[in-house]
Structures are given as C-alpha cells and as structure tokens.
C-alpha cells in the first residue's frame, strides 16, 4: 500500500512562534525549507521512535581514587574495584558517570550562570563575538535534510584561548572566561586521572596520553538547545561519536541525551551530582577497540531550553595515535590526519565516517 506523505506543518499559532527569543538563532528562517520538504514518513529515522528506555548509567565514586592519585600510593582494593568498574563500563557502554569527581558544585553553578548570560546575548552579537575566536556555531551550515540538522548553538573554546587576552570586547566576557578557565582546568585534571586509570587497566603505562594533551586542541564546548516547536521530530545534536580521547560532560536537569546501546537509543537520566564521561574515537583506536566510542545524540524539547558543557581531551595535532598493544586493527595516524578526514567526509557526504576510515 502506498504511504501518504504528510508534510511537517510549520507551527503557526502565536504561542509557538512566540517561543523564539531575540537571542535564539533564526532556525526557521535559515532551515524552513528543510522542514517543509520533510515528511512524517521520515520522522522515525530522525528519532521519533526507536527509543526507548531510560537508563541510569553506571555511577562510579571517585573519592578514594582521587585521594590515592594525590598520594601516589598503590591501589587499594576499593580503588581497584572502581577502576575495574570504569573499564567495564567503557567497554560495554562507552559511557559512565562519576561522583566525587573534584569539580565543585559551586563552580558548575557558576559556569552555568555565565553560560546562560553568554547565550542570552542577541544573536547578531554572538555571531560577531570574535573574542571567543569565532567559535560560535549553530544549526549545520551544510545540512541538506533534517537528519543533518542540529537544533542547537554552541561556543567552542580552546584552552589556549582562556589565558590572558587583550581584545577589548573580552572585557564584557571576563567573568565567563574566568569561570571557563577554572572548569576547564578541573575537568582536564579529571580527564587525565580517568584516562590514566583506564590505560593502566589495559596493562599500559598510565601516563601515555594524560601527558600528551595540548592546550590548543583541548576545548570546552558550551551547548544550548533552544525550545523547538518541531520536537520530538528534530534533533538538538545529530548522532555522532566524539573525535577526542575522552569527553567530560555536565548536563542540566532537562534531559535529552541518548546513547546507542545494543542497536537501540537509550535515554540517559540526568543526575545532578554526576558528571558524564565518554570514550572518544582516539581512545577506542588506542585501546584496540576494547573501549568503545559510542554514538550519542541529543533530542530537542518543545517547551524548555537545555544547557550542557563538555570538555574534550585531545592530543596535539602531530601526535601519532598508536596502540596500547600490537597488532592494532588500525593504521597509524596523527590527530591532524584524523580531523582532516572527518571534515572531508562531512563535507562530501554530510556524515562523519570516523575510525573505520583508518582500519588496516
Ligand atoms: O549536550 C549533551 O548532552 C551532549 C553534547 C555532546 O555530545 C557534544 O558536545 O559532543
Ligand atoms: Fe558528543
């Protein structure tokens, strides 16, 4: 039987249009044609269905582990347990949560307030904010269909941009920059500890890439997901894996983050005490696929905005991403080559291919 194509109607009631605030990017103006071209028939692919369990990711208490790291003493039974749990979550889920992580609740509140202040600047101003190193992005300039559109905006801020800065316009951003600097440094410390423990779990020297990060490639990404009148058929962030070693994420209470588990999308229930940790492509390659860089995405919400902040642990561009043990399923490649390949694929096809490009 022939299926009828029902067009996604543009929301036209005053209440739904009133939802776009002056600081919201002009999604409808820029991407309206994608919405009119899309049909309900395609909606399931974009995420309407196929989910859905809500899960609580494994939660790992880091108190004892962080104390031991500080003292550099041998592993106790308690911390050996935490480290084994982390390793098994990294293989099974590619994700886990941590509590007693060392990034203070006050600091996380402070950065959230600063993040809100930044995103509430008028859209035109955000676009012009060169002091943040032209790091502002929204939607997806190359999207040709709705399954490539991310209904969100973000600032990408490399760590190296958070130091002293002369730009005049940075004066109005100085509070935010200071909060970002503190968060980045606390999350960097955490990512170094976690990556060292996970490396150790594979029987490798623990310092391998904890020491090999680079301030110009590690970055913070501040995300905002405006309310979306096309929710739940539009994604806030399209499915992707992270192109780094490891990501540390702080999400607010709204929810919407989903990860792929056993070929199904699973929603991650927000936990206000916890930070989310996920394995990136480079760690998967380095671990010979023992740890998994898992696809994740963010769904939009019709009524409320959502915020998150992510720290990406990355090596210098020239670093060769080797392997913890030979033989590796991957060719040797540098981070620069990896990034270039990802960008080339996205440009050519609209999608990231990722690690499989580098299989031997
Ligand atoms: O906002 C989130 O919860 C996830 C963000 C994310 O996956 C990213 O920035 O790479
Ligand atoms: Fe991500």
Image (cartoon, rainbow, N blue to C red):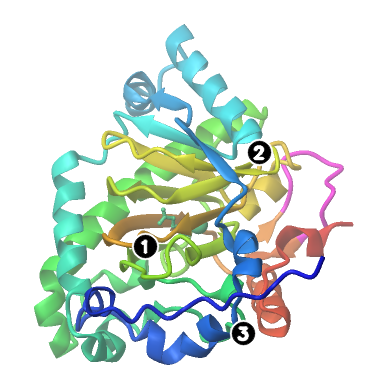
Name the residue beneath numbered marker 2. 291
Q: Position of residue 311 (x, y in %)?
A: 40, 55
Which labelled disc corresponds to residue 220? 1
Q: Is residue 92 above or below residue 348?
A: above
Q: Is residue 200 above or below residue 327?
A: above
**141 magenta-colored:** no
Dot 3 falls on a residue whose secondary structure is loop
Specify the quadrant that holds the N terminus: bottom right
Q: Around disc 3, counting alpha carbons within 10 Å, would you say few (fewer than 14), some (14 to 19), or many (20 or more)?
A: few
> Mark 3 or 2, which is nearer the eye?
3
Specify the quadrant that holds the C terminus: bottom right
Q: Position of residue 120 (x, y in %)?
A: 17, 74
Is 30 displayed left or right of 131 in the figure? right
Circles 3 and 2, Cβ within 8 Å, touching? The answer is no
Q: Position of residue 97 (x, y in %)?
A: 42, 34
Q: CA distance from mark 3 to mark 2?
A: 33 Å
Q: Counting residues from the N terminus, which is met first, the one under dot 3 or under dot 1?
A: 3
Name the residue beneath numbered marker 3. 144
- Out of 75 and 238, give the one closest to the viewer: 238
Q: Is residue 10 above or below residue 45?
A: below
Q: Around disc 2, counting alpha carbons within 10 Å, would you say few (fewer than 14), some (14 to 19), or many (20 or more)?
A: many
Q: Residue at x 67, y 46 (%)?
A: 284
Which segment did they paint magenta? Answer: 322-332
- Residue 207 in sight: no
């Amino acid at each position: 039987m022939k299926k009828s194509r029902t067009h996604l109607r543009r929301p036209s009631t005053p209440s739904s249009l009133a939802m776009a605030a002056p600081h919201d990017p002009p999604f409808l103006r820029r991407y309206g044609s994608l919405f009119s071209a899309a049909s309900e028939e395609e909606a399931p692919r974009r995420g309407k269905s196929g989910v859905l369990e809500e899960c609580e990711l494994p939660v790992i208490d880091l108190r004892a582990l962080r104390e031991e790291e500080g003292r550099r003493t041998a592993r106790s039974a308690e911390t050996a347990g935490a480290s084994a749990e982390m390793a098994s979550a990294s293989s099974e889920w590619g994700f886990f949560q941590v509590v007693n992580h060392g990034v203070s609740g006050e600091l996380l509140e402070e950065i959230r307030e600063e993040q809100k202040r930044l995103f509430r600047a008028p859209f035109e101003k955000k676009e012009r904010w060169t002091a943040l190193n032209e790091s502002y992005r929204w939607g997806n300039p190359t999207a040709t269909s709705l399954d490539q559109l991310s209904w969100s905006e973000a600032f990408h801020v490399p760590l190296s941009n958070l130091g002293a800065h002369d730009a005049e316009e940075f004066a109005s951003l100085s509070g935010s920059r200071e909060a970002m600097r503190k968060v980045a440094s606390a999350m960097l410390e955490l990512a170094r500890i976690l990556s060292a423990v996970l490396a150790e779990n594979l029987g490798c020297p623990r310092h391998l890439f904890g020491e090999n990060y680079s301030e110009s490639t590690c970055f913070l990404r501040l995300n905002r997901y405006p309310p979306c009148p096309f929710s739940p058929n539009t994604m806030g962030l399209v499915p992707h894996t992270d192109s780094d070693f490891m990501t540390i994420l702080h999400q607010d209470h709204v929810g919407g983050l989903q990860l792929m588990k056993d070929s199904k999308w699973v929603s991650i229930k927000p936990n206000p005490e916890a930070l989310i940790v996920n394995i990136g492509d480079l760690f998967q390659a380095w671990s010979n696929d023992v740890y998994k860089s898992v696809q994740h995405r963010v769904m939009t919400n019709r009524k409320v905005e959502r915020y998150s902040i992510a720290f990406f642990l990355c090596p210098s561009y020239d670093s060769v991403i080797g392997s913890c043990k030979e033989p590796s399923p991957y060719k040797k490649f540098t981070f620069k080559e990896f990034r270039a390949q990802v960008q080339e694929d996205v440009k050519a096809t609209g999608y990231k291919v990722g690690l499989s490009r580098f299989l031997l």
